Image: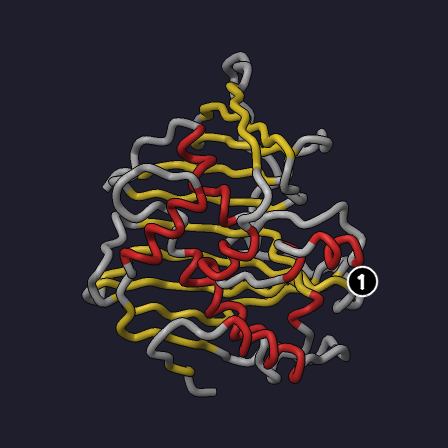
Amino acid sequence: MPCQTYTRLPSSIRTLWMGFRNRNTRYTVTVEHPPLSVALPAFAVSEKHLARYKALCGLESKGVPLFYPLTLAYPLCLRLLSQKALPFSMFRMLNREVTVSSYGPVPSGVPLRIHTAVSSQRETNKGIDLCLTTDMFHENKKTWCCINTFFFKGAGTGKPQAVPESAPCHLPSSPVPSEKPAKVPETVSWFLPHGNGFRFARVCGDSNGLHYSHWYAKMQGFEGAFTQPMLVLDKCLDKAGWNHKEKKFSATVRLKGQLYYGRELTLSHEEAAEGKHIHLFCEGNKKPCISMRAKNSEG
């Protein structure tokens, strides 16, 4: 199937309409994901869009934040998920894991080539994990990459498949034990205000009503509207004292719970041999809503 090419980021409204029109509620395990892909061959980061992102996220640093390119990748991922060729509905999906690799600062105001494709699919005991990979290039050199893992509940047979260690969807369940005594994690807190859900939806492309409509969120069984994870990822790095943004960077982010508006968020972070461990808690939930393992690499 040929790659779909765009001159600008896909419209969120049209993506939702396509997803509703093409939704597929029937799935058979014999159906594999088709070779779908989309591309922006010459897309420049807008200083205006970048400024809106920083303002809503509460960032004051210069340059392009490490997680900002997710706002460019996510609309492309959603457009792929809205395609009729996929054997399940985008409205039954849950983005539960994001892996990001940065190979240097992402430039703004210069042409970038962005390519997103369905890269792998695996069955779990509760459904299907579908991985979408986004690569960003500047002058034919890869500058940034991410893998979004989307989970479709109830789409599988209930028989989990073995996953090779090299599979992009698989990550170690726990860090390598250290012989050094465990350190007490440092913590910092801030308040997540109401009123930014719809504005940030226009920035990041995630226009799900769960992020700005309390009525709709409660209808779906949640306590209320909750923020998009992209709103807090770069702030988590800042609060954790991350200051090596010029080096190669990689992070694995697990999305575990909801960050509700009008509540206090508490971040805990600690250094480890394999990088920095970051956990973000939302008031009223003793378990972390977001867990991140971040590290720099030389070269």
Q: Give the residue at mark 1.
A: 158
Residue 130 percent location from the top left of the image: 60, 65
Total marks shown come to: 1
User: At 48% across and 74% down in the image, what residue appears?
Assistant: 11
User: At 42% across and 39% down in the image, what residue appears?
Assistant: 58
User: For the C terminus, which image quadrant?
Assistant: top left
Question: Can you say whether 3 is above or below 258 in the image?
Answer: below
Residue 197 percent location from the top left of the image: 56, 52
Q: Residue furthest front?
A: 195
Please indicate whether residue 151 sits to the left or right of residue 169 in the image. Answer: right
Q: Residue furthest top?
A: 181
Question: Can you say whether 82 is above or below 226 in the image?
Answer: below
Q: Residue furthest bottom?
A: 1
User: At 52% across and 58% down in the image, what residue appears?
Assistant: 201
The answer to which quarter of the image holds residue 71 is bottom left
Helix, strand or loop for disc 1: loop
Question: Can you say whether 12 is above or below 209 in the image?
Answer: below
Residue 242 percent location from the top left of the image: 37, 31
Name the residue nearer the viewer: 182 or 160: 182
Q: Amino acid at mark 1?
A: Gly
The answer to which quarter of the image holds residue 20 is bottom right
